[in-house]
Every structure is written in structure tokens, then in C-alpha cells.
Image (cartoon, helix red, strand yellow):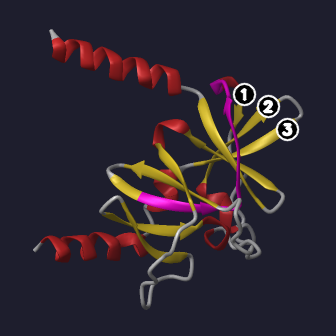
């Protein structure tokens, strides 16, 4: 009986998160990521750099004994660099069992966006590096939020070294 109760509670948690997005700012743009991917939000902390990694992969952090890679979302999107300050946060996400930290300028809020208020993403142009990571555009009143596809954001081959590094540590 306890097992069924746990499954029911997990299903209810999924329902509560359905259609909810954590929004954050990078420059003048506001992005959203589905709440179901968000584990937690932590303050900026010291990051150990990784030699020869892509420029947007800032390095590794130790989160309660678990080593996770951290990506600067602004650099990933080819945006202007911003100086880290006390409002800079790391959104810890879990995408297909890969835990990664996303450095963002500021956290905005959690918003509900119904599926019918999500428009298809703009056609990808070479000039706009972030477009290929956008799942859709969420309309909330007069404002729009660019909704990220975290699978596309993290499925790049550049993160393969993280998997290899973790495998080497386990050996």
C-alpha cells in the first residue's frame, strides 16, 4: 500500500508542476524552463575550471558531494557577457538523468503557461544562436517568454566530456 501511495504522491507532484515555468533573465530577454526539470536554485559559488572545455562550460561545482558541470547560459546563447553579482544564480536542472547547473543573471518568477498559449519557436536563423534551444514562445498577457528545450540545450556533444569524466572517476 505504501508503494501505491508514493506513486500517487509523485503523480500529484507532476500535476502541480504541469504547465509551470521557472523564468529568468539574461540581458533584456526573459527565458523559461519547465519546472519539472528544475531541482533547485543555488547561489553562485566557486567554480573549478575545466581545461580545454567550451567557453560556455564554466567548470565544475561541488553540490553536497556531487560534482556537476556548470554552463553560462548567456555565453551558450552568444549573448553579451554579464558580470556575476549577488543576484546571479545557478539553476540546477536534471535532464534525462544528467544534472547540470545553469548560470543565469537573475531569477524572475514561476509562471503558469497553458499549452494553447505556447507558440511554435521562430524559424532558426544562423544569426540567432539561442533559437535552436527554444521549444516555443509563451504568451503571458502582453509579455512573451522564450521557453527553453533543456534536452536540446544539453544534448550537444560538448557535454560528452562530463560523462567520460564521471565514468573515469567511478573506475
User: Residue 60 versus residue 147: which sits nearer the camera?
Assistant: 60
Say if the magenta span includes residue 113: yes
Judge the density around disc 1: few (<14), some (14-19), many (≥20) Cα neighbours within 10 Å: some
What residue is drawn where x is 26% and y is 76%? 165
On the image, the x and y values in percent for residue 100 come to 43, 60
Viewer-closest of 143 and 17: 17
Furthest toward the bottom, the residue is 52
Place residue 87 in its image quadrant. Answer: bottom right
Query: Quarter holding the N terminus?
Result: top left
- Under circle 2, the secondary element is strand
Label 3 near label 2: C-beta < 8 Å? yes
Residue 158 place in picture, x, y as percent = 43, 75
Magenta part of the protein: which range? 100-115
Distance of label 1 from label 3 (alpha carbons): 11 Å
Tell me the distance, in whole angstroms, between the alpha carbons under discs 2 and 3: 5 Å
Query: Residue 109, relative to residue 97: is it above or below?
Result: above
Dominant secondary structure (helix, strand or loop) of the stretch shown in magenta: strand
Displayed quadrant of residue 144 = top right
Q: Is residue 65 above or below residue 127?
A: above
Q: Are marks 2 and 1 in contact (CB under 8 Å)?
A: yes
Secondary element at tag 1: helix
* Label annotation for residue 140: 2
Nearest the eye: 34 or 152: 34
| SS for callout 3 | strand
Q: Position of residue 147 (x, y in %)?
A: 65, 45
Mark nearer the N terminus (1 vs 3): 1
Q: Is residue 118 left or right of residue 39?
A: right
Disc 3 marks which residue?
143
**On-image quarter of the C terminus:** bottom left
Residue found at x 17% / y 14%: 2
Check disc 1 and report the residue beneath it: 117
Amino acid at each position: 500500500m505504501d508503494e501505491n501511495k508514493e506513486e500517487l504522491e509523485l503523480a500529484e507532484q507532476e500535476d502541480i508542476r504541469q504547465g509551470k515555468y521557472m523564468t529568468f533573465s539574461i540581458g533584456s530577454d526573459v527565458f523559461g524552463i519547465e519546472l519539472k526539470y528544475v531541482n533547485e536554485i543555488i547561489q553562485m559559488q566557486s567554480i573549478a575550471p575545466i581545461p580545454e572545455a567550451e567557453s560556455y562550460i564554466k567548470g565544475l561545482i561541488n553540490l553536497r558531494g556531487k560534482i556537476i558541470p556548470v554552463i553560462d547560459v548567456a555565453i551558450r546563447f552568444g549573448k553579451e557577457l554579464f558580470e556575476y553579482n549577488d543576484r546571479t544564480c545557478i539553476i540546477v536542472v536534471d535532464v534525462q538523468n544528467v544534472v547540470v547547473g545553469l548560470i543565469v543573471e537573475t531569477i524572475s518568477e514561476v509562471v503558469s503557461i497553458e499549452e494553447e498559449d505556447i507558440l511554435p519557436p521562430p524559424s532558426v536563423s544562423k544569426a540567432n544562436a539561442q533559437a535552436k534551444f527554444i521549444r516555443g514562445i509563451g504568451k503571458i498577457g502582453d509579455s512573451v517568454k522564450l521557453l527553453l528545450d533543456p534536452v536540446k540545450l544539453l544534448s550537444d556533444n560538448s557535454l560528452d566530456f562530463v560523462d567520460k569524466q564521471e565514468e573515469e572517476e567511478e573506475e
